[in-house]
Image (cartoon, grey):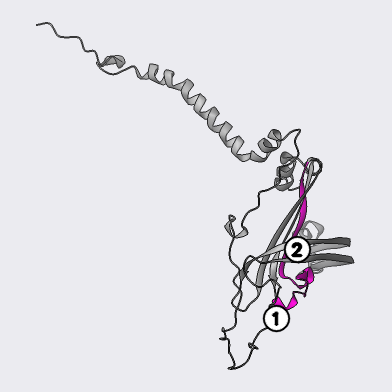
Amino acid sequence: MIAKPRLHSRGLHPGRRDIGSRNAKRRPASARQVIAACTLALLASNCSSIERLRNIGEAPALGAIQNPTTKAGYKPVQVPMPAPQPAVYNPNSLWRSGSRAFFKDQRAHQVGDILTVLVKITDRAQFENETQRSRTNKENSGIDDFIGAKALNPGAAKYIPGRILTADSTASSEGKGSIDRKEELLTNLAAVVTQVLPNGNLVIEGKQEIRVNFEVRELIVGGIVRPEDIQSDNTIESTKIAEARIAYGGRGQITDVQQPRYGQQVLDVLLPF
């Protein structure tokens, strides 16, 4: 009787491919996948650079007009509110309790109304500090004559404890610092009422974009205002806005040159020196 040869030794099992050859075929595909994944990760982390490369030679595009309440991360303002009081109407009277004027008030009072914010920021801060500190410590403790150590011969005296502890320390520090800052911003901006709080205060938000050549300037204003602080010409000063958020900046070629590169920013954060 002749035994049949066994084909499953050394990877020759019927219906099964050689494992080594299969891995060899997969290696190029795996390398391509790794390269593609790294490329996608790099592009996803540097989308702003791609956007800038795409707009080379063109002026920065202005942002589309959007509803502030539909933006990502928008959260309605919640602050402590008093208990609501119902309006009281007097019979045979044209005056309503709580009304600010006999005729219709043209100032902003509901969601969607527009009012003008008079931005006036003239801040100046000047500080100068100087600190000096010094300290000197000296510790000296020991035993001059331990059980008649002076009467012993010099050979035995060296084994007798003498000075137990002698320590000297001196520390001093001097620091100086000064701040001289001056900021001034004078402009006007129209804002939209995005929310009416239960006590009648208005939440406003406004954004303005101005493009000059290849540079876009942005001005953003937001906060909470009282209807009583809105003037008769439907304007309000920025100093009367609670929780005010005012941002003035821009984007474009000049702003891009003034910013440090991404690698430098990363090193500034990570390096301890």
Residue 100 at x, y = what percent?
70, 83
Residue 22 at x, y = what percent?
38, 19
Q: In this view, does 15 lie to the left or right of 202?
A: left
The answer to the question of whether label 1 and label 2 lie on touching residues, with beta carbons closer than 8 A, is no
Residue 61 visible to an observer of this rendering: yes
Q: In the rendered view, would you say 13 is above or below 258?
A: above
Q: Residue furthest bottom?
A: 91
Q: In the rendered view, would you say 42 is above or below 268?
A: above
**Residue for badge 2:** 161
Q: In which quarter of the image is residue 126?
A: bottom right
**Residue for badge 1:** 103
Residue 231 at x, y = what percent?
77, 75
Question: Closer to the camera, 83 or 200?
Answer: 200
Q: In this view, does 202 lie to the left or right of 150?
A: left
Q: Residue at position x 69%, y 67% from top?
A: 223
Residue 238 among those drawn in magenta? yes
Secondary structure, mark 2, is loop
Q: Give the range drawn in magenta.
A: 227-252
Task: Give the amino acid at mark 1.
Answer: Phe
**Disc 1 versus disc 2: distance between alpha carbons?**
101 Å
Q: In this figure, what is the number of numbered marks?
A: 2
Task: Give the amino acid at mark 2.
Answer: Pro
